[in-house]
Amino acid sequence: MKKHIVVLTGAGVSAESGVKTFRDSNGLWEGHEVMEVATPEGFAKNPELVLDFYNQRRRQLFEVEPNSAHYDLADLEKQFNVSVITQNVDDLHERAGSTNVVHLHGELLKVRSTYDANDIQDWKTDLILGEMCKRGYQLRPHIVWFGEDVPMIEKAITICETADILVIIGTSLQVYPAAGLRHYVPQGTRTYFIDPKPNIDSTKYLTVIAETATKGMKQLMEFLKH
């Protein structure tokens, strides 16, 4: 039976593809306060601004391609049972060939009804005010905003509980509830942490790879051969 690798990914995986992280160093999201564009209150106050913000993000997604870290993760499926749990809202893992991806914070290429959160549909063009779900309610980005529940967290926890190997890549794991996921893997699980500026040191069960996602994945592939 194939070993189960659980991979937790964040913005650092997509950064080398040219996907901008929403949040700038000054805390603004592409020049906007987080409350303006990433909360239910912001959407209620100025829906056009919020829709335009995500329309720009969605358009940018079609201008980038997966990088070698995405492809290497997908390649692991030849030898292992791989589950990717990502904080990213892009589709680069899927485009690279990963077949089991859980998006904790939603997906840019989907929209949902403001009436029924389970009424989700694929969406690749701009979303404008006045575009409705079948029940006549405005559609919104399928993104988990601040202050909203993370519907996929329970599924993610269940996946982590069956990990044989844990890989953390491109995320400092500061954002909860995603940051808590590593505590759900079985005790003594071999863990690899790929980050160019790691905030932790290697221990008995933890191997820190102080590299970018693309370089770190090459090293990880070598480790996993042995």
Image (cartoon, rainbow, N blue to C red):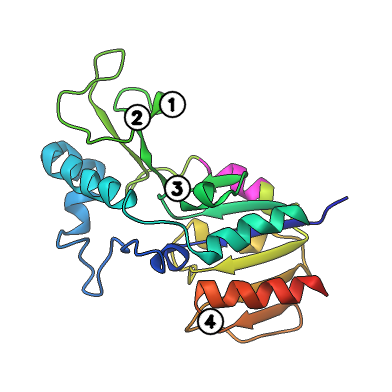
Distance from disc 4 to disc 3, alpha carbons, whole Å, reads 23 Å
Distance from disc 2 to disc 3, alpha carbons, whole Å, reads 17 Å
Residue 75: image x %, image y %?
66, 57
Which amino acid type is shown beneath numbered disc 4?
Glu
Residue 118's label in the rendered image is 1
In the displayed structure, would residue 224 be above or below residue 197?
A: above
- Please report the residue visible at 41 percent of the width from the left and 69 percent of the height from the top: 16
Residue wearing tag 4? 211
Secondary structure state at the residue bearing disc 4: loop
Residue 201: image x %, image y %?
61, 87
The stretch of residues the image draws in magenta is: 152-158
User: Is residue 210 rendered magenta in the image?
Assistant: no
If you read the primary sequence from the N terminus, does the residue marked by circle 3 or circle 1 appear first?
3
Q: Quadrant of the C terminus?
A: bottom right
Along the viewing direction, whichever of 97 and 223 lies nearer the viewer: 97
Q: In the image as oriented, which residue stretches furthest toward the top?
A: 135
If you read the primary sequence from the N terminus, does the residue marked by circle 4 or circle 3 appear first?
3
Residue wearing tag 3? 91
Secondary structure state at the residue bearing disc 2: strand
